[in-house]
Amino acid sequence: MFHPGSVVDGGLQAEPIGQTVRRALLTLTGASDEVEAWRRFIRPGEVVGLKVNPVGLSRGRGGRRTAISSPETIMAVVQGLTKAGIAPKDIVLFDRYRDAFMNCGYHRLADRLGTRWAASSVGYDETQIDPSGYSVGDPGKEKEHGAARTDGSPGVSGYDPEHFAEFAYVHPLNAPDAPHSRRSYVSQIVTRQVDKIINLCVLKEHSSAGVTGALKNLSHGLVNNVSRTHAIPSLNQCRTFIPAVVALPVIRQKVVLHIMEAFVGIYQGGPFASAYAWEPKALMMSTDPVAMDRLAWDLIDAQRARVRLPALAKSGLLLPGYASDRDEKESFHRRQPEHIELAGVSGLGVFRRTEAEWRRVHEGSERGGRKLRTIQHRRIALGEPAE
């Protein structure tokens, strides 16, 4: 879904974004109204988690917060859900790291909207293996876990020892024989606190995974012990880790909808490099994370081609003609966007564009007479400018 008014002078616009969310939802579902459309995914009485993406906070011109889940989109989704009869108390905004969540102001947004919020762990920890959500030896672990902090924010939820993905590789800082070194446990927010999940992801390049889209927002946002997948330039396991985690039954069963913001995207140096931001002014909505991420990959590669950067699959420290002295944003031997195709062959969705179903639509018209192209598809609702 493309809306030319969604970004003006670098700032996101709430009304056009709300229109875009509603139109994309109706286009995707074919429902006659917004209430019916939301109830295709969530029913009154169910608890729904909105998995936000706070990684990439960078204030740009016009106060824009580059490449994170925007308050404008979150508000549009919450308003739609409440209109469909979902009580605000049954809506939970959440992410893995409490400090990143609060740095983006999502806790204040939740308070204004009347929803709840939660976090799986306190903050970034290089080893990330304690299922409690605290760093090993953290003095606040015992007194804080499961209780509210003095500033009123909730204690972290931690991770569920009964739901995990296990891999042979470990983080270089963790002992191979340590109890949790080879496992990534699913957040208890996912396993015990919500019935359904809406995945609010953002269009971003990533120096190890290639693409941070719907799949990676789940794989690296719903479990712990993720830094082992890209700890050093030569240790990049995103291509195998991402599909395996998203394939976990508890995740597949609860994630019902993916909404990707592409109002502002990152095409290089993601997720933090606001200097490499561009404005597709679009939003994608889908029940298929693989088809969505394949399109995200194409959009990022198209933008990289416009500025004469190599395609994602041809970028990395070891690839001919693209060594570290050319761009400081290269930090891994090779990006691994092929995790998207591997997710497809793992049965998580449709990778081949010729086999997927698309509907590209637009809201309004682009200034300057720029034409917009439209094709039909029911798996993804998308809008983007034509070339």
Image: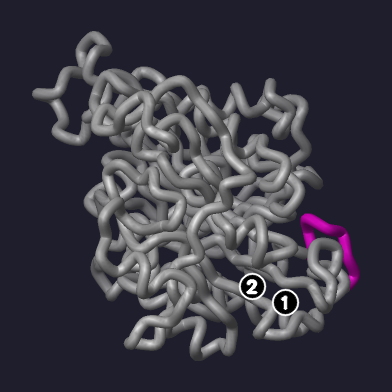
Query: Which image quarter holds the N terminus?
Result: bottom right
Q: Secondary structure at mark 1?
A: helix
Locate residue 290: give its quadrant: top right
Q: Amino acid at mark 1?
A: Leu
Q: Residue at x 80, y 79 (%)?
A: 84
Instruction: Decide if residue 352 is on the left or right side of residue 294.
Output: right
The residue where tag 2 is placed is 77
Residue 27 within the magenta-colored segment of the rendering: yes
Q: Amino acid at mark 2?
A: Val
Camera-side residue of 126 and 296: 126
Q: Position of residue 86 (x, y in %)?
A: 76, 80
Number of numbered discs present?
2
Q: Is residue 29 visible?
A: yes
Locate residue 361: give its quadrant: bottom right
Q: Residue at x 69, y 21 (%)?
A: 345
Instruction: Decide if residue 276 is on the left or right side of residue 13.
Output: left
The residue where tag 1 is placed is 81
Locate residue 46: give its quadrant: bottom right
In the figure, 269 relative to 275: above or below? above
In the figure, 171 relative to 59: above or below? above
As drawn, the residue found furthest toward the left would be 325
Q: Position of residue 217 (x, y in %)?
A: 51, 48
Q: Position of residue 186 (x, y in %)?
A: 56, 48
Tell me where the magenta segment starts and ends, as one range: 26-32
In the figure, 312 relative to 372: above or below? above
Q: CA distance from mark 2 to mark 1?
A: 6 Å
